[in-house]
Image (spheres, rainbow, N blue to C red):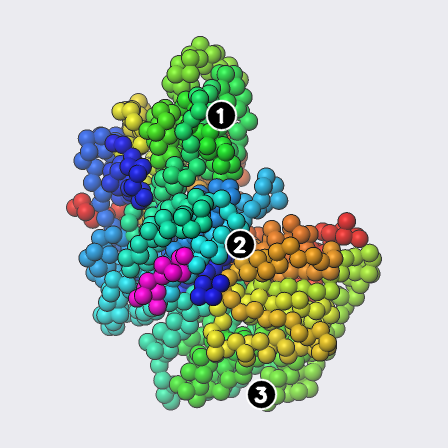
Amino acid sequence: MSGCEMIEQSRTTCALGGMYTALAMERVLPVLHCGPGCQAQARSLLGTINGAQSAVPFQESVIPCSNFGETDVIFGGADRLRTLIEHTQAAYQADLLIVFSGCTPEIIGDDTASVVSSFAASRTPVLFAETAGFRGNNLYGHAQLWTAICDQYLRPRGAEAVIPGLVNVFGIVPFYDPFWSAQLEELALLLRSVGLKPNIFYGRGKGLPEVDKIPRAEFNLLLSPWVDLPLVRRLREQYGTPYLHYPAVPLGPTETSRFLRALTDFAALSPARTEAVIREGEAQYYYYLNRNLQWLYTCRVLPKYFLVNASAAAALSLTRYLVNDLGLIPDKIYLPENVPEKNRSQVEGYFRDTELNKGVAGFPVIFTEDGGLMAAEFGDRLFDPGTLAVFGSFWDVLFCRERRIPFLSVTTPQGNRAFGVRHYCGFSGGINFFTDYFAVLAELGPFGM
Amino acid sequence: MALNLTNPEVQQREQRLGSITCYEGTLKDMAARGCSGCLGNQRRCFTTASSCTHFHALSLLIGIKDSVIVDHAPNGCASGLINFSSNRVTRIAKNPQHARIFSTNITERDTVFGALDKLRATIRAAYERYQPKIIYVSTSCTAAIIGEDVYSVVEEMRAELGITIGFAAVEGFKSKIWASGFDAYGHAVTDTILQAPTAKKNQVNYIAFADIGRQQVDELFARLGYEVLYLTGSTTNEEYGRASQSIATFGQCGAQSSYLAGALEQLYGVKYFQTYLPYGGIGFERFLREIGPFLGQAEQAEQIIAAERKKYRAELESLRQRLGGKTAVVLLGASYAYEYTRILRELGVNVLHTVGYHYDPRLDNQSAEPVAAVADARDFADVPTSVNDIQTMENYLLLRKLRPDFVVSRAHGDGCWAVRLGIPDIEGRIGLLIFGYKGLVNFGRAIADELDNQNFVRKIHAHYRSPFTPAYEAREPFFAIEKEAG
């Protein structure tokens, strides 16, 4: 299959999916210069079938779009884009517009950049993110958005002082991490608990005022295996802001404690205060776990091995949690999001960095973009019922149901059930995770019958 | 006009049927212009995200058994199919199966050097993974603009793999009407799984998304001595193969059903009934009075009508009491918009305005009989109407201006904005759920019940803060329509 880059059961959208990062910022509005159906494709995967989410307040069907058609292919769509931007400025209460361009205008050579730059003097700034679908997936689009913000929006820090304790939080990609908003709220609580001032860009009440403060942060915190790594490096050059790269959103007591200690060390926080936070978090976690222990040891099916087919970020968080806290062993890890070649060995290293005994640490980490690869490779493989669990996306539902494998959906497209403030972050996120997982095991009944 | 079923590419609705996505006026005016061939499409200077042919062709092709789709496109053009796939894997689904769709994943390099080798490799890999009986190859905006000769690879791979390989030319930019994607599905089905009849049967086709609610339709046609063959998302290929044996076809709506019904009529003489859709009481009666005699069952049809009228008379009367004088705006697809307009009037509701998400002046039937909307324009009072491809911003202003007691919409996003404006939204269910008098009273009950407790809507509205400017909120609804045809 060499030379074939095919994708089945896609877990990513095209680069236009980067618009969801903009939609997560209040009063920031994407303006789409692309085909009429491109938004609907991204929406289905990042919104509708991803926790039944839609954008607020700019719910998808009011997003301006040039709906690039045949006459535009022939005559160019630049003039229509200009008119669209003018109307958009008049119609929406937005403080920033970001033009996202799709495949068609880019191939026919529309000069989108010059249309956008003609709005330089307008009251509402207009940025341009080049996001033709053939250039990459939504993570590429997310990076393009941030490049646009850094290049076209952020100002030099000038005379403004660094705000002590202010920390920019990067790495969680809104919507692509289905639990993003609650995840960030929990993370903010954690950071505040150890004495930091989190600066978060996405979610309710978050947006441009937070983006404006980026240059004034004491440091940048990157919580992902590879996404946003170029961004924090760039910000170090642009503003001299140092960064702490902790590769996973901490989930469960082991990782959360480790993360908080690394943070305390990096930012020279009070170790005593941090240790108190850890003690309290662990106490809460183990109180709830102990309440389920009798149930757990009553004829339950408790798989020892697990497969993951998820974004690198989700896969890493939960692999570390499953290994370190729940005592499971990875069977195989699939990362179907096209992790760039140059990051792969480092990312794989993060998966090896757990408390797993060396004897069982030889599990493969597969870099692909083909979401269907796990099912295809699994094929008719024999396994003892009740020995295996799978953590993936809604695409994996049937694979698991047919084989009676306990399954929890943790990655985009997560599914079509709303989950509100659910999150898998920190100590309480660990409680959320094991209760969701035990609920899956409960469905199998005692003895797995 | 006959369908061109031999060309690999489907002809778009605009060219084939004169369909449009932009109009503002009244139904009688639009119908008259459409019939005289002078209904030009207009443009808007301000538009919001809509939908495309590609998405909707694939949404139906995934339902064909033993097939996989190879989408010759960048990754994103198939990523949204999880939306339709999710409906197919519910715990109550009869034969749950995820959409089997492979993207060739056209990348930047391919836009320069071409990607036909990747297409070949993906077709082979898809075949290896599932050993399907059929592979449908679909095209995309990018594939078309870079000039990929996709069909030549289709022909080549037919020879190599020895299986059926269908072709769906569905470049999103080529048609403003996403229903052209349904046509591409009809074209591909005709090309791959329809078969010439060995004999004709007492059988009628029903073409739709789903066969939900089929029981009463089966019973009805059984009384007429006919069996119904459902051509929907859960149809087997053998059943598609038997469609040509039917003597008549009707469909859920002109948007979804027209092409396949037209092809069955053109190729195999299966009469396509499309003037009177069987929805609500009036629709049901007209439908039965048209198809009953054709099936040689005029008398039986009259008896059924009389019995159904009697069965639902009392409840219908009480619903008319509850709903009399209420006002509504309808926002639905090309057929259902005007079906629900008539149905609401049958319930005593005053329809202030009807928004259709496109408009077909005619369909693919061979006869000169009018489309359902034109028949209603002829037979009933006029209604203000507009046509847009889900232009929610326009519809929002319209709802603000008209302030109806409720709206009827579905799935396309407009209903949420009605609710934010404090206007209850009733789902205009499609397919057999609105069939006949039973559908009529069920729908009427749903409206009356919703209006009996509006707290959900009232409180969402109370917490709604418009994200639009006061200047926009004050605009006339149709300001964006550019008057000259284009």
1 vs 2, front mark = 2
Instruction: Locate residue A64, reporting x and y percent.
Output: 33, 57
Under tag 2, what secondary structure? helix
Under tag 1, what secondary structure? strand
Where the N terminus of chain B falls, by quadrant? top left
Q: Which residue position is annotated with label 1?
A: B228
Mark 1 chain: B
In the image, what residue type sits under mark 2? Arg
Q: Which residue position is annotated with label 3?
A: A266
Tell me, yes or no, whether the two marked residues, 2 and 3, touch with CB atoms within 8 Å.
Answer: no
In the image, what residue type sits under mark 3? Phe
Q: Compared with residue B450, is residue A302 higher up or lower down, i.e. above or below? A: below
In the image, what residue type sits under mark 1? Val
Tell me what residue is drawn at x 55 percent, y 67 percent: A335
On the question of residue A369 being in view, the answer is yes
On the question of residue B446 being in view, the answer is no
Q: Which residue position is annotated with label 2?
A: B129
- For the view shown, which residue lies furthest in the top direction? B299
Could you say which is closer to the camera, residue A4 or residue A391? A4
Tell me what residue is drawn at x 46 percent, y 38 percent: B209
Report the magenta residues as a range: B109-120
Give the Cα distance between marks 2 and 3.
Answer: 49 Å
From the viewer's perspective, is B445 left or right of A211? Answer: right
From the viewer's perspective, is B345 left or right of A298? Answer: left
Give the Cα distance between marks 1 and 3.
Answer: 72 Å
In the rendered image, residue B110 lying in the magenta stretch gets the answer yes
- Same chain for labels 1 and 2? Say yes or no: yes
Mark 3 chain: A
In the rendered image, residue B69 lying in the magenta stretch gets the answer no
1 vs 3, front mark = 1
Give the Cα distance between marks 1 and 2.
Answer: 35 Å
Task: Classify mark 1: residues with Cα within 10 Å, few (<14), some (14-19) or many (20+).
Answer: many
